[in-house]
Amino acid sequence: MEGEPMRVQFEKMAIDARVDVVFAGHVHAYERSHRFSNIRYNITDGKCTPVPDRRAPVYITIGDGGNIEGLADELTWPQPAYSAFREYSFGHAVLDIKNRTHAYYAWYRNHDGNKVAADTMWFTNRYHMPNHDESLSAAAKVAYA
């Protein structure tokens, strides 16, 4: 995951503050993580060990809005277990805040000028609902089992 050194530095603060989601850019692709913390990444062998943590934020890299250089064309394969969804195609996202406890997030692939919903998620506010487990998807629970 891009920005790993920054995530590690701010992780404790984000968990303590009950941050729900972290948005980042620069990488010309899209990726959304499961909720995880204390990921250990060995750059030399590419192995990672994610730890599911419903207190942790979801990390979203959304750098696919368009650029002169084009899209990223190399991602780590196979897709790591901490990664819920990723794709390198042009797109955009909408975060619809419904009320103080819920928000709906959708990432749209822009293909030939038409938006296509490719990744969606409901967020529950971790500050107001710290024990609610809705944002840790069933897929994440299976991936980490």
Image (cartoon, grey):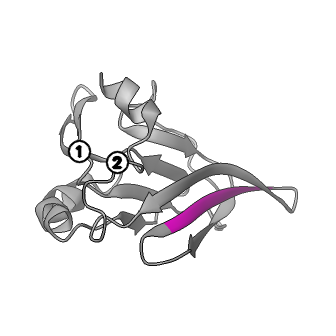
Q: Position of residue 64 (x, y in %)?
A: 60, 61
**How far across and down, in percent of the image, does residue 57 sit?**
31, 58
Classify the position of the C terminus by image quarter: top left
The mark found on residue 53 in the picture is 1
Q: Which mark is residue 133?
A: 2
Q: Which mark is residue 140?
A: none
- Residue at (47, 40) in percent of width and height: 84
Q: Is residue 18 visible?
A: yes
Query: Residue flagged by tag 2: what amino acid is it?
Result: Asp
Q: Secondary structure at mark 2?
A: loop
User: Please, what is the three-letter code of the amino acid marked with disc 1?
Assistant: Asp
The residue under the point 61% across, 47% down is 88
Q: Nearer the viewer, mark 2 or mark 1?
A: 2
Left or right side of 113 for 53? left
Location of residue 49 by image quarter: top left
- Depth check: 126 or 66 in front? 126
Q: Residue at x 65, y 65 (%)?
A: 92
Is 108 colored magenta in this rendering? Answer: yes
- Say whether disc 2 or disc 1 marks the residue closer to the N-terminus: 1
What x and y, as percent, mark residue 77? 46, 27
Q: Which residues are magenta?
A: 103-110
Q: Is residue 72 left or right of residue 117?
A: left
Left of 72 or right of it: where is 11?
left
Task: Depth check: give the residue in front, 5 or 139.
Answer: 139
Number of labels in the image equals 2
CA–CA distance in space, label 2 to label 1: 10 Å
